[in-house]
Image (spheres, rainbow, N blue to C red):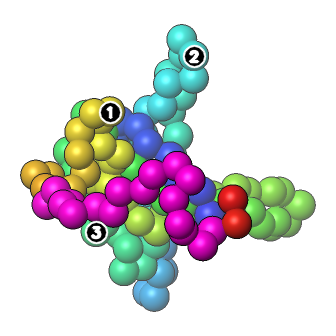
Amino acid sequence: MAFEISGKLVKTFPTENKSATFQAREFVIEIMDGNYAQYVKFQLTQDRCPLIDPFKEGEEIKVWFDLRGREWQGKYFTNLNAWRVEGAQAGAPQPAGQDPFGDVSFPEVKNEPQFQDGGDDDLPF
């Protein structure tokens, strides 16, 4: 299951080597839920651990993640496994009234055909 969410980067943790072949890194973002802040922890694994490096704490980011769950010895665990991180402004929609194509101008069309009511066109209506 893939999800995306935006929020303020609150904390970045160092990469941890969990075994000789597995590494993970966690980070926390703050999202506002009405009047209350929610702090959500994500996990990056393996070659994705450096994805959070370009961002500073306090910066708005957008996170794409998968929801993962597993059972171990009768206990259940849930991870938010991040696989893409961008600055919140990347890919943001254009503000209202702003042309997304910049200063593109189209030439004015001239010599348009002029139709008169009751003319001799071959249209049935």
Percent coordinates x, y for residue 103 in the rendering: 10, 52
Residue 13 can be seen, yes or no: no
The quarter holding residue 101 reads bottom left
Residue 120 can be seen, yes or no: yes
| Above or below, comparing residue 106 to residue 35 in the picture | below
Three-letter amino acid code at disc 3? Pro
What residue span does the magenta drawing correspond to?
107-123
Q: Residue at x 73, y 57 (%)?
A: 77
Measure the C-alpha gap from mark 3 to mark 1. 35 Å
Say few, some or many: other residues with alpha carbon within 10 Å of mark 3 (under 14 / 14 to 19 / 20 or more): some
State the SS at label 3.
helix
- Tag 3 near tag 2, CB within 8 Å: no
- Tag 3 near tag 1, CB within 8 Å: no
Percent coordinates x, y for residue 10 in the rendering: 34, 36
| Above or below, comparing residue 115 to residue 40 in the picture | below
Percent coordinates x, y for residue 26 in the rendering: 43, 55
Q: Residue at x 57, y 16 (%)?
A: 34
Percent coordinates x, y for residue 50 in the rendering: 28, 68
- Give the residue number, with chain letter if any, for mark 3: 50
Q: Which mark is residue 96?
A: 1
- Residue 47 belongs to magenta span: no
Q: Which mark is first along the chain, 1 or 2?
A: 2
